[in-house]
Image (cartoon, helix red, strand yellow):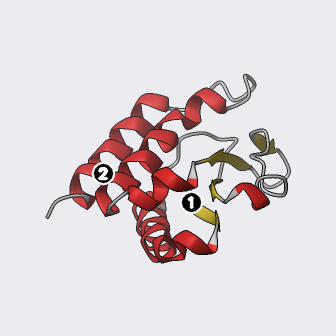
Amino acid sequence: MKFGIANYIDEEIEEKTGCINKLSNDLDSFLEKKKYSKEIDEVYFGFISVGEDGKFFFKPKKPRLSKKDKTFQFEHSFEIDEVKRYDKKELFAVIFDKLLEMPKLLPQRVSDFKAEEYEKDLNEFKDQYLQP
């Protein structure tokens, strides 16, 4: 399964971009040989953390599945003041929490998604990734 995290973040927390991009690339590599559903080949998560001025333009969209290219996309908005305070581990933890919620956001027609296997794999990756 192809995987990616898109950043929509404010300049105030631009330094978080590198951590999020590295996580995205590493998770993509980890999941590239995994297959959780016949209907999903790619998953993209939108990480949104913008100031008040940007909230009008960067509202999380509803989760969506494209049948044509078998791509599932979902987004979540994080409060910029909280993200500022997160260290690397805390940032990864909140992202992982949202990634673990992904199966609940899938349309009902995706009945073959192996949620338990996805959760197990994600937790295994998290444990390895956050080791000192």
Q: Which amino acid does label 1 sit on?
A: Phe
Percent from the top left, x then y, of residue 56? Answer: 84, 52
Secondary element at image label 1: strand
The residue at the point 49 percent across, 62 percent down is 32
Image side of residue 62 versus residue 124, left or right: right
Residue, far left: 132
Count every numbered label the image shows and give the total. 2
In the picture, which quadrant includes the N terminus? bottom right
Percent from the top left, x then y, of residue 97? Answer: 44, 40
Q: Which amino acid does label 2 sit on?
A: Lys
Sequence-wise first label, 2 or 1:
1
Q: Mark 2 points at which residue?
A: 126
**Within 10 angstroms of label 1, few (less than 14), some, or many (20 or more) residues?**
many
The residue at the point 74 percent across, 28 percent down is 107
The reply to whether the C-beta atoms of the residues labelled 2 and 1 are less than 8 Å apart is no
Q: Nearer the viewer, mark 2 or mark 1?
A: 2
Location of residue 5 (image quadrant) = bottom right
Location of residue 48 (image quadrant) = bottom right
The residue at the point 17 percent across, 59 percent down is 131
Percent from the top left, x then y, of residue 80? Answer: 56, 55
Location of residue 8 (image quadrant) = bottom right
Percent from the top left, x then y, of residue 36? Answer: 53, 41
Q: Nearer the viewer, residue 128 or 37?
A: 128
Q: Mark 1 points at which residue?
A: 3
Name above or below for residue 112 compared with residue 2: above
In the picture, which quadrant includes the C terminus? bottom left
The residue at the point 59 percent across, 27 percent down is 104
Q: How far apart are marks 2 and 1 (CA)?
A: 15 Å
Image side of residue 76 versus residue 128, left or right: right
